[in-house]
């Protein structure tokens, strides 16, 4: 058998190690069940009530995964350590992003075991058609959890806080893969491997149809991490086209968002972009012009303090073209909200993927 480094918190006790091996096997198996359930739901399109999204089987498959996470956390790893190492382990739970995921999942495990409230998940994204729909389940934001869960004082406040920051709104599969990765870092000998290899059993998960990114392995980045890299690369690369025409602006979370069209050889495409990114694009040599109410075009420039100007006049003071022939502010705001929250949409807007 190939020897492996044990990790940050090796489990020396034979009985706890055996239990840990079983629970890590179970966690990997339950993750694969959740993955499959999300790709084979009973979701359907109803003529009268639009789409009926089914996540019940997913919620049922989540329950044993939550139990396995808690057992690995408390009984296998924490309770197998010396007093000093237990304190060190708890410190890691509090400071490590994946440790915070493990801590936050305690809230849902306790709710599932001890409270009358059901542990439900939501899915804001569905792909597919006909009789085959794939859903992407995510945990409910903390403020939308049932009162019985939010007011449960028997669960530590640290678990409530961890849920707020590391669980709520995140994809279920991301959080469970994070938990698996955390325990694997603590003691890699708990995991099951394909015989004769260093490959984890059950991973990568089966590939299904996806339009952007799927995390299918504990070692892969989470969707937020991957999206952050996609957004960063999109911002560092000049937008597609010959330039952009600014026709409108609005304020969002203290930032000025500029809107208009990207100029290209055929159909122009709408864009929404924050002012600081417009400045970066101009510094990189990409042209922007602003069109005033009288139809005059003004070249947009940027000064040494990253302030935008149009013909020596602050861009924010320029009376931009009327919205009569363009989408209303609410439409622009919706487009920006989509680009601001989905890095793939933002990338496509800048680089016109698929056009």
Image (cartoon, rainbow, N blue to C red):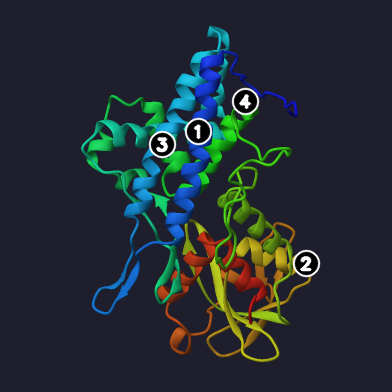
Q: Secondary structure at mark 2?
A: loop
Viewer-closest of 269 and 141: 141
Instruction: Choose the circle earlier in sequence order: 4 or 1.
Output: 1
Residue under numbered circle 2: 284
Instruction: Choose the circle earlier in sequence order: 1 or 3.
Output: 3
Residue under numbered circle 1: 100
Point out which mark residue 264 bears: none
How far is the residue under mark 2 from the one under mark 4?
A: 47 Å
Q: Quadrant of residue 230?
A: bottom right
Mark 4 vs mark 1: give the one in front: 4
Q: Is residue 171 visible?
A: no
Instruction: Choose the circle earlier in sequence order: 3 or 4.
Output: 3
Q: Secondary structure at mark 3?
A: helix
Q: Residue extending furthest left?
A: 116
**In this rendering, would 240 be left or right of 36?**
right
Residue under numbered circle 4: 187
Asked whether the beta carbons under mark 2 and mark 3 sit within 8 Å of each other, the answer is no
Instruction: Choose the circle earlier in sequence order: 2 or 4.
Output: 4
Q: Which quarter of the figure is the C terminus placed in?
A: bottom right
Q: Which quarter of the figure is the N terminus placed in?
A: top right
How far is the residue under mark 2 from the one under mark 1?
A: 39 Å
Q: Secondary structure at mark 4?
A: loop
Viewer-closest of 54 and 304: 54
Residue under numbered circle 3: 66
Instruction: Choose the circle earlier in sequence order: 2 or 1.
Output: 1
Mark 4 closeness class: few <14, some 14–19, many ≥20 residues within 10 Å: many
Viewer-closest of 354 and 45: 45
Q: Secondary structure at mark 1?
A: helix
């Amino acid at each position: 058998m190939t020897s492996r480094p044990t990790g940050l918190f090796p489990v020396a006790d034979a009985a706890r190690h055996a239990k840990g091996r079983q629970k890590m096997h179970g966690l990997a198996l339950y993750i694969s069940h959740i993955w499959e359930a999300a790709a084979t739901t009973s979701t359907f399109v109803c003529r009268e009530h639009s789409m009926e999204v089914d996540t019940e089987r997913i919620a049922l498959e989540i329950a044993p995964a939550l139990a396995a996470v808690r057992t690995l956390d408390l009984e296998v790893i924490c309770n197998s350590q010396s007093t000093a190492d237990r304190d060190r382990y708890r410190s890691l739970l509090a400071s490590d992003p994946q440790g915070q995921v493990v801590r936050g999942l305690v809230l849902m495990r306790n709710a599932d075991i001890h409270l009358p409230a059901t542990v439900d998940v939501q899915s804001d994204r569905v792909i597919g058609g006909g009789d085959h729909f794939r859903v992407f389940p995510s945990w409910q934001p903390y403020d939308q959890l049932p009162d019985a869960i939010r007011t449960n004082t028997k669960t530590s406040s640290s678990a409530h806080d961890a849920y707020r920051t590391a669980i709520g709104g995140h994809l279920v599969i991301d959080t469970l893969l994070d938990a698996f990765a955390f325990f694997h870092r603590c003691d890699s000998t708990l995991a099951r491997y394909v015989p004769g290899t260093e490959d984890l059993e059950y991973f990568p998960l089966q590939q299904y149809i996806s339009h952007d990114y799927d995390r299918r392995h504990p070692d892969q980045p989470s969707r937020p991490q991957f999206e952050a890299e996609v957004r960063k690369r999109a911002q560092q690369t000049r937008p597609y086209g010959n330039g952009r025409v600014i026709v409108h602006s609005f304020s969002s979370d203290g930032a000025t968002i500029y809107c208009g069209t990207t100029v290209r050889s055929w159909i122009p495409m709408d864009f929404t972009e924050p002012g600081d990114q417009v400045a970066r694009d101009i510094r990189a040599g990409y042209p922007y012009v602003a069109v005033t109410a009288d139809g005059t075009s003004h070249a947009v420039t940027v000064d040494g303090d990253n302030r935008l100007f149009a013909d020596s006049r602050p861009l924010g003071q320029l009376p931009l073209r009327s919205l009569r022939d363009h989408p209303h502010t609410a439409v622009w705001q919706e487009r920006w909200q989509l680009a601001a929250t989905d890095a793939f949409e933002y990338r496509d807007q800048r680089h016109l993927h698929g056009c």
